[in-house]
Image (tube, rainbow, N blue to C red):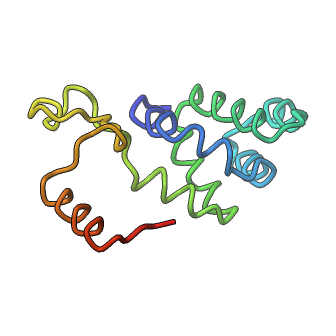
Amino acid sequence: MEPANAAKIDSHFDYIVQNMDTYSTLKNLLENRTLSSENHQRIGRITLSVDANQELLKVLKETPGAYEKFIDALNESKQFQLVQTLQTMSAPAPLSSPEAEEGQSPTEDPITTPLPSHEKKGILFMKELDISFK
């Protein structure tokens, strides 16, 4: 698999592992000849789907041209949310991104990062009205 496509999988690895339908994906990857029958059987014998999905992704990342066939297999098995995640969501900006160069951390923690002044005014207004979200 091409490094850019492997990076897409890596950036959403946990989400894919937790949400992928192992059986359908394996079946479709065998049918479209992305997986050998040996890999299909070996991965199919793994009892926990999370472990099987991790192994499947590892094999796919080592297989040339597997990304497009993986996307096809997900579409065939109606796992559209995974396809959408891989094709539209991006990973956090790398440290060499324009955002990082402008002084913004690409991995800012929303809990500890100070709010912009216009958002602070909204919070103060809610406090004045004694609004709470309990």
Nearer the observer, 80 or 96: 96
From the viewer's perspective, is 73 left or right of 47?
Answer: left
Nearer the observer, 115 or 34: 115
From the viewer's perspective, is 19 left or right of 128?
Answer: right
Q: How many marks?
A: 0
Q: Where on the picture, by quarter, is residue 57?
A: top right
Residue at point 66%, 63% (across, down) = 76
Residue at point 12%, 31% (across, down) = 103
Q: Where on the picture, by quarter, is residue 37?
A: top right
Q: Is residue 26 above or below residue 24?
A: above
From the viewer's perspective, is 29 left or right of 125?
Answer: right
Residue 47 drawn at (x, y percent): 90, 36
Residue 132 drawn at (x, y percent): 42, 67
Residue at point 9%, 34% (across, down) = 102
From the viewer's perspective, is 75 left or right of 99?
Answer: right
Residue 55 drawn at (x, y percent): 72, 30
Residue at point 58%, 56% (across, down) = 72
Residue 5 drawn at (x, y percent): 44, 38
- Residue at the left extreme, as displayed: 102
